[in-house]
């Protein structure tokens, strides 16, 4: 049985040490170790600047993450600069960790450049990885099995001598254990006897199954009496399941990334893991009061990473608690537990009823209520709106992702919205010059409050210049439009068999200091579809500002 006494000689008072305690013979607190800034940065298409890494560090610290792995100071100038900068910053909740490897073969630990860089980074915690799989010892780093054990123990001992909290990542441990369990355990014992504060078992190739993880972790616990952690990869879509299996088997530290970022198929998604620990397993990780910030943090990291989060992402995706089918919506109105496994408020999300031809009249009634419109589902108005909605969706409109356009659709139908301007006409052109440069231009003519307004703009793309020309023509009458900007633009071809003459659906997201809203347009001409969505975006902004 694990006891505090077995932590003797290791770093006291750290989040890891505090989590290492017995409650009714079970390890209760789970320590969260985030590696978004290192493993997450290895995602294809993701590249963080030093400023990005600092911003993400502050956001993760604000959430209450226990450990933030900042990068590998010995591997590149960017990470070295980051750690130099972080020496001047003070974190409120998290401990910063630097990452590296064990010493190279056949040299002394104190002579190893990588280990010296870890000490120089001045982080309170360092994490080093070493080889657990004999294949990697003989075929990759090409040394002897005995020297590999020395590399592990010497490196941990050197870092402990420098008064650092040391975590040891046993790389490829599960593969190594399955091929040569005796040697794999010897590598762990080398780190443990050198006073490593926590030994992390890594499923580096992501090829292990949850029942294998549980069985192997239980076996390791019989031989290693100190704290264990888990680090999994998502190559079988099992990284979260494997992490939870390891926690149930006795691991108290879990490593991963936000939104499952990482090389190949990614790492274990800490957002999902923390949500499950809180809502299903009753195991505390970050503070209970901070779980509600999971969605906000997840989307912030997604934005800084320039990596789109899937709408159906568990717990925090926009569609995670969205209901579209009429039967589902009817049941949800009677009892939210009918089609939701948790209250979405817990993780900072919210329930949504989607408007579509599948949903019946109820979303229309509910939307009307939010707009302070009394509408009976049996009334002629509700039936007319439903018929027109079905006709529009048959034409290719999609209001479930364009709630601003849906609100305008409702108010126009009920004669509760008057347009703020009228179009007299617009012209858009694109020109490619002899030097290869491409320019676009747009002219917009409007009638605004009885006055004729016109604006001409040149720029890079046709939609960009059309948007700018429209707002330029409106600027004198509606100066508040300066505070909004186009933040996303999506085009979908609706029927590919018609080729370039096919209908297209355009979704445009606008944003101001108070939030964002999405509008939709449909037409065979992509510019006309874009115009429709742009006009709705501005009409919605003017409408909500009047409120």
Image (cartoon, rainbow, N blue to C red):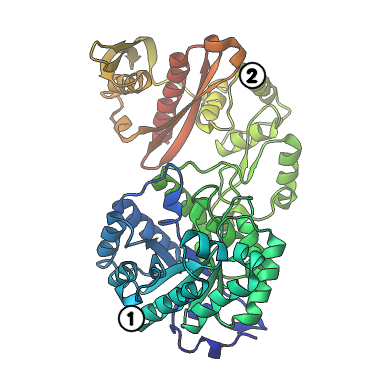
For the residue pair 439 and 254, the one nearer the viewer reads as: 254
- Provide residue 381's location: percent of width, then percent of height: 66, 23
Q: Decide: few, some or many residues near mark 2? Use Cα within 10 Å; few <14, some 14-19, many ≥20.
A: some
Q: Residue 419 or 7: which is nearer the viewer?
A: 7
What separation in Å lies between label 2 and label 1 (alpha carbons)? 73 Å
Q: Quadrant of the N terminus?
A: bottom right
Q: Nearer the viewer, mark 2 or mark 1?
A: 1
Q: Which corner quadrant of the image does residue 77 belong to? A: bottom left
According to the image, label 2 marks what residue?
388
**Image point (36%, 18%), residue name:** 462
Which residue is more in the foreground, 342 or 273? 273
Q: Which secondary structure lies at badge 1?
A: loop
Other residues around mark 1 within 10 Å, as few (<14) / some (14–19) / many (≥20): few
Residue that badge 1 annotates: 162
Name which of mark 2 and mark 1 comes first in the sequence.
1
| Residue 291 place in picture, x, y as percent | 53, 61
Tell me: 220 left or right of 86: right
Q: Quadrant of the C terminus?
A: top left
Q: Would residue 432 appear left or right of 293 to someone viewing this image?
A: left
Give the mark count: 2
Position of 358 relative to 304 (above/below): above
Residue 79 in sight = yes
Name the residue located 37 percent from the left edge and 61 percent from the top edge.
70
């Amino acid at each position: 049985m694990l006891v505090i006494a077995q932590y003797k000689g290791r770093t006291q008072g750290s989040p890891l040490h505090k989590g290492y305690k017995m409650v009714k013979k079970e390890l209760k607190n789970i320590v969260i170790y985030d590696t978004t800034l290192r493993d997450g940065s290895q995602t294809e298409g993701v590249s963080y600047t030093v400023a990005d890494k600092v911003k993400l560090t502050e956001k993760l610290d604000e959430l209450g993450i226990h450990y933030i792995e900042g990068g590998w100071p010995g591997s590149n100038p960017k990470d070295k600069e980051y750690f130099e900068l972080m020496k001047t910053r003070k974190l409120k909740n998290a401990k910063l960790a630097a990452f590296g490897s064990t010493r190279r073969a056949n040299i002394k630990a104190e002579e190893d450049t990588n280990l010296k860089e870890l000490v120089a980074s001045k982080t309170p915690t360092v994490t080093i990885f070493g080889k657990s799989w004999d294949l990697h010892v003989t075929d990759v780093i090409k040394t002897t099995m005995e020297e590999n054990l020395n590399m592990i123990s010497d490196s941990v001992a050197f870092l402990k001598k420098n008064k650092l909290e040391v975590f040891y990542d046993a790389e490829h441990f599960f593969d190594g254990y399955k091929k040569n369990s005796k040697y794999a355990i010897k590598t762990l014992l080398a780190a443990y006897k050198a006073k490593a504060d926590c030994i992390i078992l890594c499923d580096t190739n992501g090829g292990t199954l949850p029942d294998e993880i549980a069985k192997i972790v239980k076996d390791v616990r019989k031989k290693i009496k100190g704290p264990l952690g888990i680090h999994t990869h998502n190559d079988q879509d099992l990284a979260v399941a494997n992490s939870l299996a390891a926690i149930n088997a006795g691991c108290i530290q879990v490593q991963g990334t936000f939104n499952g970022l990482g090389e190949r198929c990614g790492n274990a998604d800490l957002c999902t893991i923390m949500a499950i620990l809180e809502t299903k397993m009753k195991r505390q990780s970050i503070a209970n009061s901070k779980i509600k910030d999971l969605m906000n943090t997840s989307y912030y990291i997604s934005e800084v990473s320039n990596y789109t989060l899937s709408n159906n992402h568990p717990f925090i995706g926009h569609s995670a608690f969205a209901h579209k089918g009429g039967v589902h919506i009817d049941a949800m109105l009677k009892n939210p537990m009918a089609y939701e496994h948790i209250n979405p408020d817990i993780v900072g999300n919210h329930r949504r009823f989607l408007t579509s031809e599948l949903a019946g009249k109820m979303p229309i009634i509910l939307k009307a209520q939010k707009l302070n419109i009394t509408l009976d589902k049996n009334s002629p108005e509700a039936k007319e709106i439903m018929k027109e909605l079905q006709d529009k969706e048959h034409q290719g409109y999609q209001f479930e992702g364009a709630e601003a356009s849906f609100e305008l659709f409702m108010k126009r139908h009920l004669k509760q919205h008057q347009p703020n301007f009228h179009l007299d006409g617009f012209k858009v052109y694109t020109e490619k010059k002899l030097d290869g440069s491409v320019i676009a231009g747009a002219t917009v003519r409007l009638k605004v409050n009885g006055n004729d307004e016109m604006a001409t703009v040149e720029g890079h793309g046709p939609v960009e210049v059309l948007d700018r020309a429209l707002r330029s023509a409106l600027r004198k009458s509606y100066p508040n439009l300066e505070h909004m900007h186009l933040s996303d633009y999506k085009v979908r071809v609706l029927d590919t068999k018609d080729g370039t003459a096919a209908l297209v659906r355009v979704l445009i997201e606008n944003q101001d200091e108070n939030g964002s809203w999405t509008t939709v347009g449909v037409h065979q001409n992509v510019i006309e579809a874009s115009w429709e969505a742009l006009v709705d975006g501005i009409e919605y902004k003017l409408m909500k500002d009047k409120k």
